[in-house]
Amino acid sequence: MKRIVILGSTGSIGESTLDIVRKFPDRFSVLGLTAATNDQKLEHQIRLFRPKVVALSSECAARQLRRRLGKHPVDILSGEQGLCAVASLPESDLVISAIVGGAGLLPTMAALRAGRAVALANKEPMVMAGELMQREAHRQGIRIFPIDSEHSAIFQSMEGHRLCDVRRIVLTASGGPFWDWTREELAHATPDQALQHPNWKMGAKITVDSATLMNKGLEVIEARWLFDMTPDRIDMVIHRESIIHSLVEYCDGSVIAQLGHPDMRTPIAYALNYPERVPLLPQPLDLGKIGTLTFSPPDFERFPCPKLAYAALEHGGALAPALNAANEVAVQAFLERGLPFLHIPTVIEDTMQSCTHRSPTSIEEALAVDRWARTHASAIAKRYLT
Ligand code: NAD
Ligand code: MG
């Protein structure tokens, strides 16, 4: 029986993880859960999965939850400290990191520092401080298992092979809802349109990241640190059908890929059960019925965000955490404050160009860059609000 902790249990990945737990009650027990503010959904999860400890970021939401749960046997913590305490519970066997954004950095680091194995969906901390996170994992002798479907595909396609034989990895990208839009059309793209992803049902932030292709940029940086792969060996290709989840090319010309229905429960279950596989999706992958799998190169003119991510890796320093923070601010401004879609990359690029911080040597320094970049990006975004 694996005792698991889920950081971000009320989100899309959190709920898919709990769906797997429900399907395999003799494999998993839930030890801890965390959420930002949604105390009602968390209450429902507590009654269903009976965790020992939970935490909400919001103190106010935690108070309401305590009131409603009365004598129910669960400790309810709050704030960043509470989240980090749940992340580092010594009895846990695996921590599923599924908070969205840089807010997941401290709790995920807390899990690593406590020597807990981590299954990582929350890619932004890897972008902000991937090297520091991997260093901590090595120090603790633990593994970070990828949940992101592309990285799970690469992980699976590398199983049984030598890292030194890998020539390059290729991340597939669906292209998002705007793949065939002109720049003129993109100029008027609305949040509602951006939130219509053709293949995946996900949280709002990553859905907008998919529309700008920044999701693929973040994933290049994530792959850089997860697989210790230099950026010149990480490529991307547009694959509209989201059936091939990524590919690994070896020095002899062989290319190994992982295929499957676009359903996050497959990569989540692989990370939860590694190295075992469990019976999950009953419907076969009927390639005859799917018929055609298509591929095309990404268009960095209409979608410049991945180029910014490559630049952040190439120039190093503090550019990756600056890019991440500026992207979070710009996406939120697009969703809530009328920042035009095409100005999301403008805000990020301006923030990167203004960033003079040195390469962070600690989590505290990475967080200082994050704070600076958020302030800077907010000021830039203001100029373009409609
Ligand atoms: P989501 O918005 O659906 O859920 C986010 C979760 O994080 C919620 O439980 C929320 O309460 C919590 N949260 C949000 N802000 C927080 C804060 N400031 N402090 C503490 N907790 C906070 O997001 P999601 O789509 O599940 O994505 C989660 C992460 O997984 C993201 O980093 C995303 O890029 C990555 N990911 C998601 C998918 C997917 O299919 N959804 C696929 C690959 C990777
Ligand atoms: Mg992905």
Image (cartoon, helix red, strand yellow):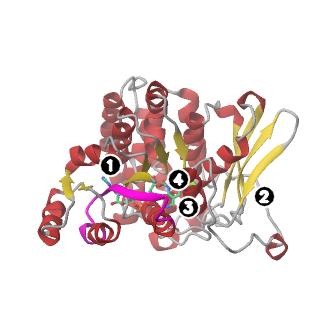
Tell me which amino acid carries mark 2: Phe
- Across and down, in percent, residue 349 comes to 48, 42
Tell me which amino acid carries mark 1: Ser
- Across and down, in percent, residue 164 comes to 74, 27
Tell which of 125 and 87 is nearer to you: 87
- Marker disc for residue 272: 4
Tell me which amino acid carries mark 4: Leu
Q: Residues within 10 Å of mark 4 (few under 14, many from 20)?
A: many
167 drawn magenta? no
Measure the alpha-carbon separation of dots 3 and 2.
17 Å
Residue tagged 3: 211
- Marker disc for residue 378: 1
Measure the alpha-carbon separation of dots 3 and 1.
21 Å
* Residue for point 56% across, 48% down: 305
Q: Which quarter of the image is occupied by the C terminus?
A: bottom left
Query: Is residue 81 toward the left or the right of residue 241 in the image?
Result: left
* Residue for point 80% across, 64% down: 293
Magenta stretch? 24-41
For marks 4 and 3, give the one nearer the viewer: 4
- Marker disc for residue 295: 2
- Across and down, in percent, residue 230 comes to 64, 30
For marks 3 and 2, give the one nearer the viewer: 2
